[in-house]
Image (cartoon, rainbow, N blue to C red):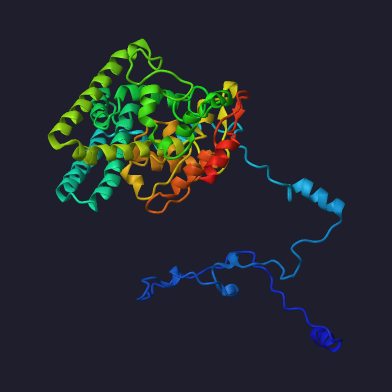
């Protein structure tokens, strides 16, 4: 009757309203019938409910089907009061990488699985055997083929393998190779001496680098230059420091003379790099380095200097370029300006969080995932073969303090662009202030741009 009255008045009748059930509707057991193509039964299929005959009646939307605007216009005062109360529309403050993090080292450590801390000497040695076989295999193949199509390919491959040997010796220096100090020392000396690196001398200075990472004055390798030291540098020194390719050849000079503003040598047991108890270790490493240099001289007489240059000399130069490139870009060249610290603002955690992970494409596995640098710097005792897993586990804790690396193509040529951009703008930091950022010298920047 009501429907007839409404229709006579030209009004549409309301849809019939059904009462909402107050108790669950009992369902029969699902059918055991299986479908041949999917091997699923009727109960396995995710069918949308239709009416009350479905057992999943709770999935039905019982709210009224009213079409309403998502947002109702209000006066300016009301809008401000709503935004103020709920925080809607307020600008999110920009992340400040120099702000003290809301977590500590123990929080990061707790997030990393326990097995990531386990050192397996057999696994570590397997990487040494793998790399040594590849090194000798490449040298034998190049010497046998001996043509100018093969030699450039050999130099690139062997230079990269020398760099891989260095990374394994680097693990020995950190004690992440094994829990046996003697094994670490023997393996480290064999690996590093073979590529003309004084193992203990470098190990000790590298320890200083880790202990002071992110500190303007106390960091050891590729630390920023304070403005006073930068202004005192002559044009030749500035060129060697900031004009590519010269910075990529800095490592042998650093071993002998350290960085600008610092004194000492990795070969001198009396250097201020070392304490008296470390002098015997430094002498041992210097003797091993000298023995390797003598062996190379002898090989030069046996096979001739040109053949030695092709087999060892040029790969050594490319290894040095790898080492300088990787070391520099793990601490410089990020698209965001990252802070450097001194004084009370510096801490081990805050300094470590300024390090940068890098992706090297196909090279990641070859050089033992050294690109996972943030976690390595905070916890250098983690073996390289656990660094990827440890990094993934720590990311939720690190939050915005972790910067995802740019994805590389199979060969990481993009890193050359990153290096060039950094060399044009990252020149010095202020002499004062406990939190400082790189500044640009316009004369170097303009000269670099015009080349």
Relative placement, left or right, of 265 versus 280 is right
Relative placement, left or right, of 214 versus 311 is right
Q: Residue 424 in the image: state x and y as whole percent.
A: 53, 40
Residue drawn at 42 percent across, 23 percent down: 208
Of residues 359 and 76, the one nearer the viewer is: 359
Q: Residue 171 in the image: state x and y as whole percent.
A: 32, 32
Relative placement, left or right, of 374 versus 125 is right
Q: Residue 299 in the image: state x and y as whole percent.
A: 16, 33
Q: Residue 449 in the image: state x and y as whole percent.
A: 54, 45
Task: Single out the residue that lies furthest toward the left.
Answer: 302
Up-down: is 285 above or below 339? Answer: above
Which quadrant would residue 288 be assigned to in this image? top left
Which quadrant would residue 143 be assigned to in this image? top left
On the question of residue 201 being in view, the answer is yes
Residue drawn at 79 percent across, 50 percent down: 82
Up-down: is 205 above or below 146? Answer: above
Residue drawn at 56 percent across, 74 percent down: 53
Of residues 34 and 112, the one nearer the viewer is: 112
Quarter of the rendering occupied by the N terminus = bottom right
Relative placement, left or right, of 84 versus 100 is right
Up-down: is 435 above or below 338? Answer: above
Of residues 310 and 291, the one nearer the viewer is: 310
**Total numbered labels:** 0
On the question of residue 402 being in view, the answer is no
Which quadrant would residue 280 be assigned to in this image? top left
Of residues 271 and 377, the one nearer the viewer is: 271
């Amino acid at each position: 009757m009501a429907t007839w009255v409404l229709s006579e008045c030209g009004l549409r009748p309301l849809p019939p309203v059904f009462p909402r059930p107050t108790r669950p509707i009992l369902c029969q057991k699902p059918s055991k019938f299986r479908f041949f193509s999917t091997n699923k039964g009727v109960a396995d299929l995710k069918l949308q409910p239709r009416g009350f005959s479905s057992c999943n009646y709770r999935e039905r939307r019982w709210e009224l089907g009213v079409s309403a605007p998502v947002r109702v216009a209000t006066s300016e005062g009301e809008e401000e009061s709503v935004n103020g109360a709920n925080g809607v529309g307020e600008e999110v403050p920009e992340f400040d990488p120099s702000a003290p993090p809301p977590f500590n080292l123990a929080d990061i450590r707790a997030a990393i699985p326990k097995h990531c801390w386990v050192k397996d000497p057999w696994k570590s040695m397997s990487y040494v055997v793998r790399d040594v076989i590849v090194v000798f295999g490449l040298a034998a193949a190049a010497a046998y083929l001996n043509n100018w199509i093969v030699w450039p390919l050999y130099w690139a491959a062997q230079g990269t393998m020398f760099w891989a040997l260095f990374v394994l010796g680097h693990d020995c220096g950190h004690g992440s190779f094994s829990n046996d100090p003697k094994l670490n020392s023997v393996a480290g000396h064999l690996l590093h001496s073979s590529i003309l690196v004084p193992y203990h001398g470098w190990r000790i200075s590298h320890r200083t680098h880790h202990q002071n990472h992110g500190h303007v004055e106390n960091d050891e390798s590729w630390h920023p230059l304070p403005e006073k030291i930068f202004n005192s540098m002559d044009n030749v020194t500035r060129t060697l420091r900031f004009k590519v390719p010269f910075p990529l050849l800095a490592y042998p000079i650093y071993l002998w003379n350290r960085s600008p503003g610092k004194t000492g040598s990795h070969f001198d047991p009396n250097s201020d790099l070392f304490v008296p108890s470390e002098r015997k270790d430094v002498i041992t490493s210097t003797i091993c380095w000298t023995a390797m240099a003598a062996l190379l001289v002898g090989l030069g007489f046996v096979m001739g200097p040109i053949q030695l240059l092709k087999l060892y000399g040029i790969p050594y130069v490319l290894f040095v370029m790898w080492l300088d490139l990787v070391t520099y870009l793990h601490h410089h060249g990020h698209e965001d300006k990252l802070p450097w610290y001194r004084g009370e603002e510096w801490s081990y955690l805050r300094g470590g969080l300024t390090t940068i992970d890098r992706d090297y494409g196909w090279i990641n596995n070859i050089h033992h995932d050294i690109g996972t640098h943030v976690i390595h710097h905070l916890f250098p005792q983690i073996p390289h073969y656990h660094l990827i897993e440890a990094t993934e586990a720590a990311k939720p804790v690190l939050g915005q303090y972790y910067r995802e690396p740019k994805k590389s193509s199979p060969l990481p040529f993009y890193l050359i662009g990153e290096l060039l951009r950094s060399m044009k703008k990252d020149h010095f930091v202020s002499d004062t202030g406990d939190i400082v950022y790189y500044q640009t010298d316009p004369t170097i920047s303009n000269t670099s741009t015009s080349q």
